[in-house]
């Protein structure tokens, strides 16, 4: 069967989507997708379309996440949960090399065989933008992380255009959504109980062909109507319109944000947020772009086997900035300032882009509801106020 052309559109029903999943699994891929578990929509192993969170909606706000059932909700009307592509391409714990002691001599053990290639279903625009940032970190500038590259090169992405936002979404402010523009193999838009599927790559065309789906093209008018779905949502987000009982989405003024933050290292807002911040590291754990890690040796109880492991780290931890036996950022305010200033300003110097994609996870999963859009707006409202700590405390 001849593969369809790139950028062509095709109608899929639930059985067609199942055929795509079956085709991907038939190639030996591990298929990951959204499913309900532990009171949230997480990313986990997916075998059947019946496992998708059809009929579930999420309600998110600062420090708040709830699921509720809604018979009218489609398979992808939830927004992003606590997981992102980072959990699978840059895992929280990874063995880099193993050593074993035999007859008093240490030997490096053979590397484990590569894991099955991944296919991820339900990727949003904000997470595709985060993937581009992670690619820059792990593959760019001549410094290549081989484990990341192995997983990335074999990754198959089925993206989804959002038709709903929650109160913590601000991807429209960062230019990272809600429409998916590029970087996917297939992209789905849910319309009236079925899916309009755009082919984004030769690999996507091949899988669609192998699934037997090439004979249900959209008409020109249908394709234009489908394209408007995420753009209509973006218009409502820009207008900050509340819809379907959901509080209006947040917004972030990114104009001159790098200079704004760099010019205010002593702003009193840093101390203000420190009275609320728990330094719990939740924001860095759920952030799809944070990439800090530490490497340590982990031994078994016998002392004859050692794994060198890479684990996620966070700049909110006191030991993260330890040098010569002392932390260089010993206060919560200095650690929050480091995180937010690096994310929204320092990344622009390092990588040519902000480190934020507007997914809103850090707002939702902060246990005290600290809101980056609110903190930056507060600094912007008093731009130029660089009161010295001595003066602020007097």
Image (cartoon, helix red, strand yellow):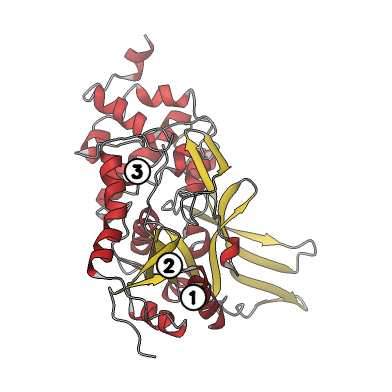
The answer to whether residue 89 is left or right of residue 214 is right
* Nearer mark to the viewer, of 3 and 1: 1
Residue at the spot 23% in from the left edge and 32% down from the top edge: 263
Rendered image: mark on residue 221:
none
Name the foreground residue: 114 vs 200: 200
Seen from this angle, which residue lies furthest bottom? 1
Near-viewer residue (204 or 210): 210
Give the SS element for disc 3: helix
Element assignment for label 1: helix
* Mark sitting earlier along the chain (3/1): 1
Q: Judge whether residue 109 can be spotted in this image.
A: yes
User: Mark 2 — residue?
Assistant: 158
Task: Look at mark 3 in the image and give the residue it sits on.
Answer: 342
Q: Quadrant of the C terminus?
A: top left
- Choose mark 2 or mark 1, whichever is in front: 1
- Marks 3 and 1 close (CB-CB < 8 Å): no
Number of the front mark, 3 or 2: 2
C-alpha distance separating marks 3 and 1: 40 Å
Q: Is residue 285 above or below residue 326?
A: below
Residue 170 screen position, x and y as percent: 34, 42
Q: Position of residue 286 (x, y in %)?
A: 50, 48
Residue 160 screen position, x and y as percent: 40, 60
**20 left or right of 227 in image:** right
Contact between marks 3 and 2 (CB within 8 A): the answer is no
**Residue 20 bears which disc, if any?**
1
- Quick check: 329 left or right of 31? left
Displayed quadrant of residue 149: bottom left
Mark 2–mark 1 Cα distance, whole angstroms, equals: 10 Å
Q: Is residue 47 left or right of residue 329?
A: right
């Amino acid at each position: 069967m001849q593969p369809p052309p790139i950028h062509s559109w095709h109608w899929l029903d639930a059985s067609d989507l199942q055929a795509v999943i079956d085709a991907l699994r038939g190639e030996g891929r591990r298929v990951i997708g959204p499913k309900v578990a532990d009171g949230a929509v997480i990313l986990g192993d997916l075998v059947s379309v019946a496992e998708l969170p059809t009929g579930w909606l999420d309600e998110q706000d600062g420090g708040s996440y709830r699921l509720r059932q809604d018979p009218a909700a489609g398979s992808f009307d939830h927004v992003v949960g606590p997981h992102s592509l980072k959990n699978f391409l840059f895992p929280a714990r990874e063995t880099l090399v193993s050593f074993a002691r035999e007859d008093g001599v240490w030997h490096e053990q053979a590397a484990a065989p590569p894991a099955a290639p991944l296919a991820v279903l339900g990727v949003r625009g904000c997470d595709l933008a985060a993937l581009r940032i992670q690619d820059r970190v792990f593959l760019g500038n001549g410094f290549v992380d081989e484990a990341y590259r192995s997983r990335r090169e074999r990754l198959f992405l089925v993206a989804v255009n959002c038709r709903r936002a929650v109160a913590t979404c601000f991807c429209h402010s960062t230019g990272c959504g809600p429409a998916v523009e590029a970087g996917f193999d297939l992209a789905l838009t849910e319309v009236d109980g079925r899916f309009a599927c755009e082919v984004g790559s030769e690999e996507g065309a091949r899988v669609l062909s192998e699934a037997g789906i090439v004979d249900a093209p959209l008409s020109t008018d249908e394709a234009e109507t489908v394209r408007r779905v995420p753009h209509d949502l973006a218009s409502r987000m820009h207008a900050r319109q509340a819809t379907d009982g959901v509080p209006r989405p947040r917004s972030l003024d990114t104009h001159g944000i790098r200079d704004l933050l760099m010019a205010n290292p002593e702003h009193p807002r840093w101390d203000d947020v420190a009275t609320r911040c728990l330094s719990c590291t939740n924001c860095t754990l759920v952030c799809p772009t944070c990439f800090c890690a530490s490497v340590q040796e982990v031994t078994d109880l016998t002392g004859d086997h050692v794994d060198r492991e890479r684990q996620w780290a966070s700049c909110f931890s006191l030991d993260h900035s330890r040098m010569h036996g002392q932390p260089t950022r010993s206060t919560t305010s200095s650690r929050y300032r480091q995180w937010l200033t690096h994310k929204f300003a320092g990344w622009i110097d390092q990588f040519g882009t902000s480190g934020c994609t507007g997914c809103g996870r850090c707002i939702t999963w902060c246990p005290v509801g600290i809101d980056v859009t609110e903190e930056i707006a507060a600094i912007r409202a008093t731009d130029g106020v660089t009161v010295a700590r001595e003066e602020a405390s007097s």
